[in-house]
Amino acid sequence: MSKLKRLPAKFYQQDTFALAENLLGKYLIRKYNNHILNGKIVETECYYGPNDLASHASRGKTERTKLMFAQPGLAYIYLIYGMYYCLNIVTEHKNFPAAILIRAIEPISGLKQMAKNRQIPVAQNSLPITKLTSGPGKLCQAFKINKSLNGENLITSKKLYLATNTQEKITPKQIKKAKRIGIDYAGQYKNKLWRYYLKDNLFVSQK
DNA sequence: CCTGGGATTTTCT
DNA sequence: GAAAATCCCAGGA
């Protein structure tokens, strides 16, 4: 078993786009009750600055979006389509709105609990493993991430944080850049290649 | 393979 | 009152 080390404050102080690439291959750890869930981040998406029409922050600072304007290393979690939560990592300095959406994860441990948390009210005998955490809404459901973790500090939190295996390295060749998903309304910003994912990874939400 | 619709509720106009 | 950084399922080619 390889050794995982929590990522320090300094990790989150990188430029948003560098950070989005460097988040690939890192581990998301979630602890609740007596459970520990662990998954590898395989897909990320940047929302950057006050002008990005795809970003919640493009319409200014509000009660919901204020965390995007906060210090780096916090969790920004919101409800989408009235049904699913999305997990973001706040980036950039205070008062500059930016965040990275965690779009997909490869489950590493705690799969049984993840499947339980994902149980959908439709008659279905088994959930294929590739559908367990392959999307922003799905991974939040699997990891029991909801509004109660909004604003959680990933640098100090006992419930939610990121870790790295220092022996593992992701090379630029393994990373694919692509357009963001579900933001067709964003004008010229819809064509920005601000989504990053690990090529050939089965758990990426969309190629 | 693809397209379209329904679920469900917070947020902002 | 409309839109939304989603997901799942049904139906057609």
Image: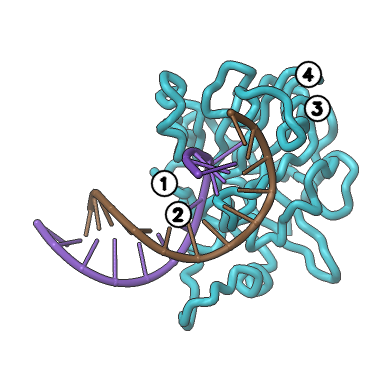
Chain colours: A cyan, B brown, C purple
Disc 2, SS? loop
Q: Position of residue A91 (x, y in %)?
A: 72, 27
Query: Which numbered mark, 1 or 4, is in the foreground of this view?
Result: 4
Mark 1–mark 4 CB contact (< 8 Å)? no
Task: Identify residue type, mark 3.
Answer: Ala
Disc 1, SS? loop
| Chain bearing mark 1 | A
* Residue A95: mark in rendering: 4
Disc 4/disc 3 C-alpha distance (Å): 6 Å
Which residue position is annotated with label 3?
A70
Disc 1/disc 4 C-alpha distance (Å): 32 Å
Sequence-wise, which precedes: disc 1 or disc 4?
4
* Residue A73: mark in rendering: none
Mark 2: few, some, or many residues within 10 Å (few <14, many ≥20)?
some
Which residue position is annotated with label 2?
A202
Q: Residue at image x 78%, y 18%?
A: A95
Sequence-wise, which precedes: disc 2 or disc 4?
4
Disc 2/disc 4 C-alpha distance (Å): 37 Å
Q: Are tags 2 and 1 found on a single chain?
A: yes
Q: Where is residue A60 in the image (x, y as percent from the top left)?
A: 68, 22
Q: Position of residue A109 (x, y in %)?
A: 68, 64
Q: Are tags 4 and 3 found on a single chain?
A: yes
Task: Identify residue type, mark 1.
Answer: Gln
Mark 4: few, some, or many residues within 10 Å (few <14, many ≥20)?
some
